Image (cartoon, rainbow, N blue to C red):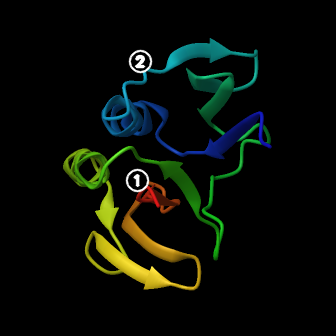
């Protein structure tokens, strides 16, 4: 459904360090540098989709979306735990309940939530095979 997601960040190099470690747990290579003449960006690519971080085009500070969450698919609960741990070890903060299994209307899910250095909320989600 999505072609790309881009988040605004304030400290591009601190955010690159965070996302290189976080997305590295999914086997994604470090961010690819891009400068469009106005702002600095890094792009992460996997399976035909892109995730990017950028300093805002308008020069204003980046802010996180209140109520927004970006979810990443995990192959196993252990991968979700590694994603969460890499985030916390590289400038992120844990949020929500601790990583673990949740029962909900869509069935059993393994979830691990972390906020990036700018407060953007990220979710590692594993759906067990039925």
Query: At which x and y percent is residue 30?
Result: 41, 19
Q: Which residue is mark 2?
A: 29
Q: Is residue 28 left or right of residue 3?
A: left
Quadrant housing the N terminus: top right
- In terms of secondary structure, where does tag 2 sit? loop
Q: Do labels 1 and 2 touch, CB within 8 Å?
A: no
Nearest the camera: 90 or 104? 104
Residue at 31% across, 52% down = 80
Query: Helix, strand, or loop for circle 1?
Result: loop
Q: Residue at x 48, y 63 (%)?
A: 119
From the viewer's perspective, is the residue at label 1 or at label 2 nearer?
A: 2
- Point out which mark residue 117 bears: 1
Q: Earlier in the sequence, mark 1 or mark 2?
A: 2
Q: Position of residue 108 (x, y in %)?
A: 43, 74
Residue at 38 percent across and 43 percent down: it is 75
Query: CA separation, marks 1 and 2?
Result: 20 Å
> Dot 2: within a 10 Å radius of its alpha carbon, few (fewer than 14), some, or many (20 or more) residues?
some
Choose between 13 and 125: the one closer to the eye: 125
Residue 35 locus on image (x, y percent): 67, 15
Q: In the displayed structure, would residue 14 be above or below residue 100?
A: above
Q: Is residue 106 above or below residue 49?
A: below
Quarter assignment of residue 70: bottom right
**Placement of 128 over or under 37, stated as above or below:** below
* Residue lying farthest to the front in this orientation: 130
In the depicted structure, whether residue 66 falls above or below residue 46:
below
Q: Quadrant of residue 100?
A: bottom left
Q: Position of residue 8 (x, y in %)?
A: 63, 46
Quarter of the image where one finds residue 53: top right
């Amino acid at each position: 459904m999505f072609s790309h997601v881009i988040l605004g960040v304030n400290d591009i190099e601190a955010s690159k360090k965070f996302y290189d470690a976080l997305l590295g747990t999914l086997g994604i290579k470090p961010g690819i540098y891009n400068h469009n003449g106005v702002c600095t960006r890094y792009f992460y690519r996997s399976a035909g989709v892109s995730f990017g971080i950028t300093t805002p085009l308008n020069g204003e500070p980046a802010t996180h979306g209140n109520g927004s969450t970006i979810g990443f698919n995990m192959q196993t609960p252990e991968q979700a735990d590694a994603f969460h741990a890499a985030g916390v070890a590289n400038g992120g903060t844990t949020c929500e309940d601790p990583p673990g299994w949740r029962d909900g209307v869509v069935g059993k899910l393994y979830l691990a939530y972390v906020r990036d250095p700018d407060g953007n909320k990220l979710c590692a989600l594993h759906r067990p095979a039925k």
